[in-house]
Image (cartoon, grey):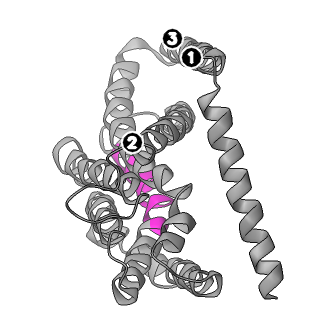
Amino acid sequence: MASRRDLLEDVSRASARVGAHMASDATGLELVALVVVCGFCVVLQALMARRGAVKHGAGDHVAFQRLRRRYNAVYALGTFGDWIQGAYLYALYREHGFEMADIGYIFVLGYFTSATLGTYVASLGDEHGHRKLVMLYGVSYGIACVAMRWSNLAVLLVSRVLSGVAYSLLFSSFESWAITEADRVRVDRRYLVQLFSAATFFNAVSAVAAGIAGNAVVVAPDAQTTPLGGNRYAPAFDVGAVSLFACALGARTWWAEA
């Protein structure tokens, strides 16, 4: 088993070196292709929005656009903070010195929390308001990201519990607020198709942006010399924490209680 584990780790390190080499040899063609695809998607979203204005009426469409701007701004910040962690979560635990089995237990705790406590907390939105739960998402997930700088097992377990709860809120409270708010401002529910379509687009954009930003801060020369600690993958979680706290602040500022 030990030799097999060593082989897997050697393969992982080799893959990381190959990926870094490919990234360093990039000529910019990939970036151009990315910009072209994103530009095409933006144009497509604009055409869909104009089609909705013609189909449902300009007056109703103005209210929908206002709702879409408020929703997507907060949603993009929330998903960015989630996406930027994914590529470095396992690597951060390894950098802290944990073995593969220990990391597996930490992950299981997060999934178990999301399926149990997270499901219960997400159900409280109808009683206490979905905006409050979105704010809870940003604050709890942000604290979980900050806690990733510490190598203490108890701190990391608390971080996974907070992350598990936040993960359930991400996939329930945002959409619930949008539907409730659409009813409050009397936006036709037919617009929700366009709203969630645009949200899916911004989710994809935030994933791409998170990948670029995460790589930039992790490979930065001074990534290990920050005053808060020496884990080289922690800066990606710091950026995620900033985005998540901004998500909570945006929900507090731009969203009505619903």
Q: Earlier in the sequence, mark 1 or mark 2?
A: 1
Q: Who's the residue at 57% across and 20% down the image?
A: 38
Residue 80 at x, y = what percent? 43, 45
What's drawn in magenta, residue-wise? 167-181
Disc 3 marks which amino acid?
Arg
Q: Is residue 112 left or right of residue 130?
A: right
Q: Who's the residue at 25% across and 54% down the image?
A: 245
Please give the label number shown on residue 99: none
> How far is the residue under mark 3 from the one under mark 1?
23 Å
Q: Earlier in the sequence, mark 3 or mark 2?
A: 3
Instruction: Assess whether residue 176 is covered by the magenta stretch.
Output: yes
Residue 105 at x, y = what percent? 58, 87
**Foreground of the two, 206 or 226:** 226
Answer yes or no: do the residues labelled 1 and 2 have beta carbons within 8 Å? no
Disc 1 marks which amino acid?
Val
Q: Is residue 42 left or right of residue 154?
A: right
**In this figure, which residue is indicated by the disc labeled 2?**
220
Q: Is residue 8 left or right of residue 174?
A: right
> How far is the residue under mark 1 from the one under mark 2?
23 Å
Answer yes or no: do the residues labelled 3 and 1 have beta carbons within 8 Å? no
Q: Nearer the viewer, mark 1 or mark 2?
A: 2
Picture quadrant of residue 216: top left
Q: Main secondary structure of the magenta part?
A: helix
Please give the label number shown on residue 35: 1
User: Please, what secondary structure does the residue beneath circle 1 have?
Assistant: helix
Residue 189 at x, y = what percent? 49, 38
**In this figure, which residue is indicated by the disc labeled 3?**
50
Instruction: Assess whether residue 141 is covered by the magenta stretch.
Output: no
Q: Is residue 64 left or right of residue 250?
A: right
Q: Residues within 10 Å of mark 2 (few under 14, many from 20)?
A: few
Q: Who's the residue at 75% across and 76% down the image?
A: 6
Q: Earlier in the sequence, mark 3 or mark 1?
A: 1
